[in-house]
Every structure is written in structure tokens, then in C-alpha cells.
Image: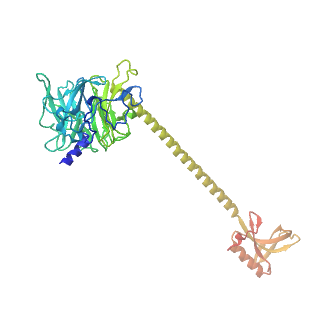
């Protein structure tokens, strides 16, 4: 059971069991020693429209991020009574959720997020309705040790507000894992990650709607959004635009952050937030301040998900957006669509080059085939011309021309054929295309007293001594 619990925590709520020792560290000024990012207020990635800076808050297991709440953020920290315990020895009961106001990049004095009840659950796994009166959060069920989604209502107290937690999870949570809920601003739509049987990959994003006082049966967002990998950490901004992390869609590293624009009826294809946000590491737990729409948080970590978590804050560059009318989600979408267009152009250029290469290969093949056919035709014509061979039987030669006359051989009359060759006049009879017929006439000539008779060949009307013409 313990092994299964650890496995679930690692995948779903990214438990950081081996995080660095935080003893004697100032919570508000601590950055993970494994961070490879620049410190201070230096912007991490080069883009004029947004600023991305390390945020001086150490992330504690089992959390991987923070969540905006009212005018500040909610995060996990050591409870006072366990402040000096090593984090690798902590369980859910030894850390608590705290809330602190946030002005620019400075946190106010922290106070317990839930004064009346212990709330040691991952901050990136909680979501609120528009007036922060209802909260949904992920925690491990005591019934089957699976992560499920629960609801809590704000209960105004005399001196401070507390939360009243539902005992049972949401009705659609059955024997699977349900985590990272995100609620639309009007509280009517919830998207979460689950490994339900209808999943395309490991963990998929599902949607449920609040109708007639209850949540509808979840529906898979489909293979336009989900991949054969894992989709986690969904977040809906105030316009229902969806942000999430995926290790199955095409990206730059392990988990990359993607955005899907809401078009009024559904979500468009995911766009990678580009190298401005994503790296070869994991980028997870993206969340935007819905009220002001000018800042966001996300976490970068090593692919193992065990060490090296660093919280990062994104804000609009006021020099780039001086009129303050652009929201951060809109700026991020602009970055994503620009990168998409560049990638598409590169893809189109690559396709063009490949098409030209294939066309050149086709033309070259056609040229070679034409040359081959031409060579075959010329050879055939040459062969045809060479095959015009006439065989005759020469029976007499003389220094003087005798002219043409008739002779009788074997009872048959033949017209003589006289030609001059090598200084003498030669007389021949017969005209055959077949060597055997000429040999037969030669034999008859010899029988008739012309003992020196022999077969001669003319190739294209020219006497030929080519021995191959006389092979039988």
C-alpha cells in the first residue's frame, strides 16, 4: 500500500520526497540550490513582451507550485511545530497551506490558509470560483488510496474565515485517480486530469459541467488536446483559455506548457508556449492571476521531478505594453502562435525543398530513361542496317570483264553478277539472305565443275570478310 501511495503521489501531485534540507533557511528568500537559473531580477528568456524571473519561495513536497488566491498566493510551508524537521521526513500532516498577499514580487506576512482545519494539500491542485467562496482540491482518498477531487465552502468566522470540507469526493470520482481540477470563472466548467478507462494516454484531461446542481459525467477532451503521454496541471483563465503541461505533445523537454484558445464552443489545437517558457526540463503548474491578468507562476524542474524545482514568475513588460490593455494570456498566446507560424514556415520550407528534390529525382529518372530508349533505338537501327547481308556464290575470277550472262547449274539458270574486287573481276551467282542456301548452291557449282566456287557476303552492298557472317 505504501509503495502504491508513493507512486501515485509522484505522478499526480509530484511529491518531492528528496527535496533539499530546508532547516535554518529563510522561507521568503530561499531558492533551490539545484537551480541552474539566474538569480535576482534578471529576465531568464529573451522576449521583449514578457519578463520571467525566479521567485524567492521554496517549493515543498508534495506541492509543485502555488495558486493565486484573492490578492496573494497559497503555498505549502512547514507548520511551526515541525519547522525544524527535515523535509524528507515529512508527511502530509507536517506541512500546512499558507496564504500571503503579493505586491509585485514581494510576499506579505504569511498566515494559515485554513485556520480551522489542517490543509496540507498541493497548492497547484486547488481551484476557486470567482468570489473565492467555493474551492475544489485534490487529496488522497482514505477509502482506496487514490487521488480524488473534493469540495470545500468558505465559512465566515468571527475573527477569520475557515473552510468547511465535504467528507466525500465529487460524485463522478470512482475507482480512478482525479487530480489538478481547474474551475472556470463562473464556476460552470471544470477540467481535471484523470486516468479513467477512456483515457487516450496515461493521464488525460477531462471536462465536466455544473448543471442542475450537480457535475455531469466527465468527457474526454479528445485527441486534439490529449496525447498518448500524460496531460497534467490544467488551468482555465478568465476567458476559459486552457493551459496545461504535457509530456506527449511535441515539445522541447519532458513536460512542456501548452495553451488552447477557447473559441466560444470548445478549445482549439494546443500551442507550445515556445522556448520563451519551455526548456529541456519539466515546466509544470502554470497559473494566472485571473483578476489582474498581468502575472502568472509556473515551475521548472529536472525531468526526474525529484530535485531542482524552481518557482518562476511571469509578468508583462510594461515597456512593451505601456497602455496596460493587454492581458498576460493574450501576450503568451501571441508568443505561441508566432512560434507556431515560424515552425509551420520552416515545415513548409522543408516540404518545399523535399518536393523539389523529389521532382528533380523524377526528372532525372525520366531523362535517363529517355536516353536509354534512344540508345536502344539507335542500336536497333544499327543492328537492322547491319543485318542487310546478301550471300552469293563466286565461281570465277578474271583480269578482264566478261559482263553479265546466264549459266546453268543443276538444271537451273542463273544470271551472273560481276564486281571488281582487289584488282580482278569476279563473277558470282545467286542472292540469299540465308547462309545455308548459299552453301547449297556452292556445292552444286562444284558438282558442275566449278571446283573453286565459294560463298561470299555483301553487307550493305559492300563485300565483307567478317568471319562472323559465315558461322553456321
The correct choice, above or below, for 451 with respect to 193 in the image is: below
The image quadrant where one finds the C terminus is bottom right
Residue 430, by quadrant, is bottom right
The correct choice, above or below, for 387 with respect to 248 in the image is: below
Q: Position of residue 425 (x, y in %)?
A: 85, 70
Residue 470, by quadrant, is bottom right
**Closest to the observer, 369 or 343:** 343
**Closest to the observer, 468 or 304:** 304
**Closest to the observer, 326 or 373:** 326
Q: Position of residue 250 (x, y in %)?
A: 37, 40
Give the colouring mode of the picture: rainbow
Q: Is residue 466 left or right of residue 95?
A: right
Q: Residue furthest top?
A: 323
Instruction: Decide if residue 212 is in sight here.
Output: no
Q: Residue furthest right?
A: 400
Q: Position of residue 206 (x, y in %)?
A: 24, 38
Look at 74% across and 79% down and name the residue there.
Answer: 443
Look at 69% across and 74% down and name the residue there.
Answer: 436
Q: Is residue 22 left or right of residue 451?
A: left
Look at 40% across and 20% down and name the residue there.
Answer: 319
Number of marks in the rendered image: 0
Q: Is residue 242 left or right of residue 171?
A: right
The correct choice, above or below, for 400 with respect to 5 in the image is: below
Residue 419, by quadrant, is bottom right
Q: Position of residue 205 (x, y in %)?
A: 26, 38
Q: Residue furthest front?
A: 24
Instruction: Decide if residue 50 is in sight here.
Output: yes
The correct choice, above or below, for 322 with respect to 410 in the image is: above
Amino acid at each position: 500500500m505504501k509503495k502504491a501511495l508513493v507512486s501515485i503521489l509522484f505522478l499526480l501531485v509530484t511529491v518531492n520526497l528528496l527535496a533539499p534540507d530546508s532547516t535554518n533557511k529563510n522561507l521568503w528568500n530561499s531558492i533551490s540550490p539545484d537551480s541552474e537559473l539566474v538569480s535576482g531580477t534578471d529576465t531568464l528568456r529573451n522576449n521583449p513582451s514578457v519578463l520571467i524571473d525566479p521567485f524567492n519561495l521554496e517549493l515543498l513536497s508534495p506541492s509543485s507550485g502555488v495558486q493565486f488566491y484573492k490578492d496573494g498566493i497559497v503555498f505549502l510551508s512547514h507548520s511551526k511545530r515541525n519547522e525544524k524537521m527535515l523535509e524528507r521526513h515529512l508527511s502530509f500532516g507536517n506541512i500546512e497551506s499558507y496564504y500571503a498577499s503579493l505586491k509585485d514580487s514581494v510576499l506579505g506576512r504569511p498566515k494559515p490558509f485554513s485556520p480551522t482545519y489542517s490543509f496540507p494539500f498541493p497548492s497547484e491542485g486547488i481551484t476557486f470560483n470567482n468570489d473565492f467562496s467555493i474551492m475544489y482540491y485534490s487529496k488522497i482518498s482514505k477509502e482506496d488510496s487514490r487521488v480524488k477531487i473534493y469540495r470545500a465552502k468558505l465559512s465566515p468566522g468571527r475573527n477569520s474565515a475557515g473552510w468547511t470540507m465535504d467528507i466525500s469526493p465529487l460524485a463522478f470520482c470512482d475507482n480512478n485517480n482525479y487530480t489538478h481540477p481547474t474551475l472556470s470563472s463562473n464556476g460552470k466548467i471544470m477540467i481535471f486530469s484523470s486516468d479513467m478507462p477512456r483515457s487516450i494516454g496515461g493521464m488525460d484531461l477531462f471536462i465536466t459541467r455544473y448543471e442542475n446542481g450537480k457535475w455531469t459525467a466527465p468527457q474526454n477532451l479528445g485527441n486534439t488536446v490529449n496525447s498518448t503521454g500524460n496531460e497534467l496541471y490544467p488551468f482555465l483563465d478568465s476567458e476559459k483559455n486552457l493551459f496545461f503541461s504535457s509530456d506527449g505533445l511535441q515539445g522541447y523537454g519532458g513536460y512542456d506548457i501548452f495553451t488552447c484558445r477557447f473559441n466560444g464552443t470548445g478549445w482549439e489545437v494546443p500551442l507550445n508556449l515556445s522556448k520563451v517558457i519551455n526548456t529541456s526540463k519539466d515546466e509544470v503548474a502554470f497559473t494566472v492571476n485571473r483578476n489582474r491578468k498581468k502575472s502568472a507562476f509556473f515551475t521548472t524542474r529536472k525531468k526526474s521531478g525529484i530535485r531542482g524545482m524552481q518557482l518562476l514568475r511571469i509578468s508583462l513588460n510594461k515597456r512593451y505594453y505601456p497602455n496596460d490593455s493587454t492581458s498576460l494570456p493574450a501576450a503568451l498566446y501571441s508568443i505561441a502562435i508566432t512560434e507556431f507560424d515560424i515552425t509551420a514556415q520552416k515545415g513548409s520550407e522543408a516540404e518545399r525543398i523535399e518536393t523539389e528534390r523529389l521532382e528533380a529525382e523524377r526528372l532525372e529518372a525520366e531523362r535517363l530513361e529517355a536516353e536509354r530508349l534512344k540508345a536502344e533505338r539507335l542500336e536497333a537501327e544499327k543492328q537492322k542496317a547491319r543485318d542487310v547481308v546478301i550471300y552469293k556464290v563466286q565461281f570465277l575470277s578474271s583480269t578482264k570483264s566478261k559482263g553479265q550472262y546466264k549459266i546453268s547449274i543443276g538444271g537451273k539458270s542463273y544470271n551472273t553478277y560481276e564486281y571488281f574486287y582487289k584488282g580482278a573481276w569476279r563473277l558470282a551467282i545467286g542472292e540469299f539472305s540465308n547462309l545455308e542456301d548459299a552453301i547449297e548452291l556452292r556445292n552444286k557449282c562444284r558438282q558442275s565443275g566449278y571446283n573453286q566456287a565459294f560463298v561470299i557476303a555483301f553487307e550493305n552492298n559492300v563485300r565483307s570478310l567478317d568471319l562472323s557472317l559465315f558461322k553456321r
